[in-house]
Image (spheres, rainbow, N blue to C red):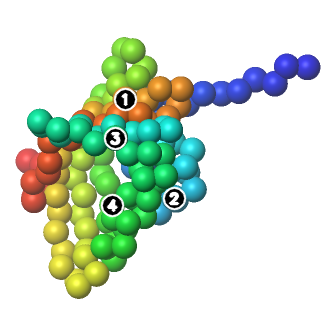
Amino acid sequence: MQVSTTTRTAREVVELYNFVVWNQRNFALAEELLGDSVIRHDVGESHRLTHEQAVARIADRWEMFESIRFDLNLVVAGDDDEHVAIVYQSPMTLKDGTVATVGSMEIFRVVDGRITEVWNCGYKQGVWQ
């Protein structure tokens, strides 16, 4: 008897990463969704994180916040089922009680159900108009 395995689409991976890993602090799911390495691209530079560093980055960021949420205003999946672009805003409360919202866009590359690259050129305080 052959067991079938279901691979998540790139869009499903990116949505789970934002809605479950980040919004619900499910760091165990991050272990599953992040690649052996994750390259984080910015304009003029990129950083390769090991799997462990990529997972720890999320937990470390959460240490700064009392609450943080990613609201995806737009999700566009490429025809190649590897690339997914998101437009997000993120309301957050820092540990000191400071409340802010930032917005940005990111493009993810997902290979074999795991995030391997992320492009982001920064964020800006405020909400999308």
Instruction: Return the residue found at the far bottom.
Output: 96
Which is nearer the N-term, disc 3 or disc 4? 3
Instruction: Return the residue found at the far right.
Output: 1
Relative to residue 93, is residue 6 drawn left or right?
right
- Residue 3: image x %, image y %? 81, 24
Question: Residue 118 occupies which quadrant of the picture?
Answer: top left
Provide the residue designation for mark 3: 48
How many marks do you count on the picture?
4
Which is nearer the N-term, disc 3 or disc 2? 2
Q: Amino acid at mark 2?
A: Phe
Q: Nearer the viewer, residue 55 or 80?
A: 55
- Residue 106: image x %, image y %? 25, 39
Mark 4: which secondary structure?
loop
Between circles 1 and 4, the one closer to the viewer is: 1
Q: Measure the C-alpha gap from mark 1 to mark 4.
A: 22 Å
Mark 3: which secondary structure?
strand
Provide the residue designation for mark 1: 109
Q: Are marks 1 and 3 in contact (CB under 8 Å)?
A: no
Crowd rating for badge 1 (residues with CA inside 10 Å; few <14, some 14–19, many 20+): many
Q: Is residue 1 above or below residue 34?
A: above
Which is nearer the N-term, disc 1 or disc 3? 3
Q: Is residue 63 above or below residue 112?
A: below
Provide the residue designation for mark 4: 69
Q: Amino acid at mark 4?
A: Arg
Provide the residue designation for mark 2: 27
